[in-house]
Amino acid sequence: MNKEQYNLIAIDIAKDSLQVYHDDKSESVTYNPKGLAHLCRAIGKLKKPWVICEATGGYERPLMALLYAKGITVTLVNPARVRAFAKSEGIRAKTDPIDARVLLRFAQEKSLQPTPPPEPQNQELAALMDRRSHLTEQLAREKNRRQKGDPFIGKSIARMIIVIEDELQILDQKIRELIDTNCELHANSQIFLSVQGIGEVTAWTLLAYLREIPHLGRNQLVALAGLAPFNRDSGKSSSKRSIQGGRAKVRKCLYMAAQSAALYNPVIRDYVARLRERGKPYKCAIVAAMRKLLIHLQSLLKNYKKCLA
C-alpha cells in the first residue's frame, strides 16, 4: 500500500491512556469509552486515516476492535522493532509522547502492511486458549507446592488442584464445541490431528495463534513461528546459528509435538535419527523436526484448499 495516500496516526497505548501523535501534534486521551469516542471523531475527520500502534499484551484489543468497526486501517507492530529503531536513532528517553513520535517515524520509514481484522471465532478461540494457558501454569505451580509445601496446607492445595482441573475440563469442552461449530476451524483441526505427533492442544494452538499458515511462504511461516535459524557470521568467524523471536506460544507447543513425533511418527523419527547420526545435538534435531512438521501441516492445508477451489 502507498503510505503517501494516507494520514498516518501513531497511538501509544497504556492501561489508562492513549497518546496520539499526528502532524507534529500530540494529544493524550483517556482509555475509556468517552476517550475512545473522542478519538474516533477526531480520526474520522481525516482523509484516509491509517492508525499504527504496538502490541501491548491485550490492552490494544478494545482500541483495535473499535477502529475495525469504523472501517479504519490499522497496523499492529512489534514493540521490540520500534524500540530498536529508537535506539538506532539515538533516542534513549522513553515517555508516552516520545514513544508516539518514534512510532510515527517508524511507520513513515518502514514498509508496513495493514493488520487484517480477526474473525470473531478466532478471537474467541484465542481468548479461551489464553485462559487455558493461565490455568495450566497455575496448576503446575500448585502441584509443585504440593510436593514441597508444608503438610498443614496440603488439603488446601489439593482442593485448589481439583478446582483448576475441573475448570480446565470446562474450557476444553468449550474449545471443542467452538471448533466443531465452525466448518473451517473443524476442517483445519482434523487436518492437523491427522499427523502423528499433533494432539488436540497443538492443533488448538495453531488455530488460535497461527491462522496465517495457508497464506504465507515457507520461509515467512517458519520465521513467524520463531523457527528460522539466523546466521551469526563476521569475517572469517562463523558462530552457531540460533532461533529467536516469533510467536512463543506456537514454538513452545510445536516443541512438545516434535518430541512426540520423534517417538511415534515414522517420518519424523527417521529424520531426527539421521540428524543425530550426523552429530547434531538433540535440541537442534528437534527444532529441525518442528520446522518439518510445520511445513508439512502448511502443505496439507494448502492442498485441502486447492481441492475446495
Image (cartoon, rainbow, N blue to C red):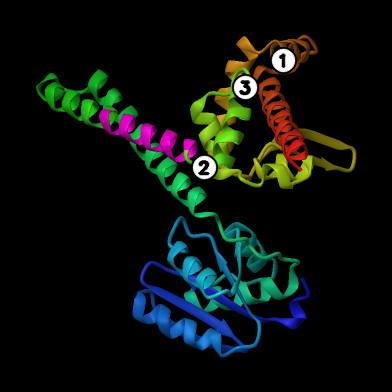
Q: Which residue is mark 1?
A: 272
Calculate the distance from the C-alpha at mark 2 to the C-alpha at mark 1. Answer: 35 Å
Range shown magenta: 166-180
Which comes before the other along the chain, label 1 or label 3?
A: 3
Q: Is residue 174 magenta?
A: yes
Indicate the quadrant where residue 130 lies.
Answer: top left
Q: Residues within 10 Å of mark 1 (few under 14, many from 20)?
A: many
Which comes before the other along the chain, label 2 or label 3?
A: 2
Image side of residue 228 versus residue 206, left or right: right
Does 288 sit above or below residue 28?
above
Calculate the distance from the C-alpha at mark 2 to the C-alpha at mark 3. Answer: 18 Å
Q: Which residue is mark 3?
A: 194
Q: Main secondary structure of the magenta part?
A: helix
Q: Quadrant of the C terminus?
A: top right
Q: For numbered disc 3, what is the local secondary structure?
A: loop
Q: Amino acid at mark 3?
A: Ser
Image side of residue 14 versus residue 51, left or right: left
Q: What residue occupies the far right of the structure in this picture? A: 236
Query: How many discs appear?
Result: 3
- Foreground of the two, 182 or 240: 182
Residue sitting at x 61%, y 45%: 211
Image side of residue 84 versus residue 64, left or right: right
Q: Is residue 204 magenta?
A: no
Q: Amino acid at mark 1?
A: Val
Q: Nearer the viewer, mark 1 or mark 3?
A: 3
Q: Which residue is mark 2?
A: 182
Q: Amino acid at mark 2?
A: Asn
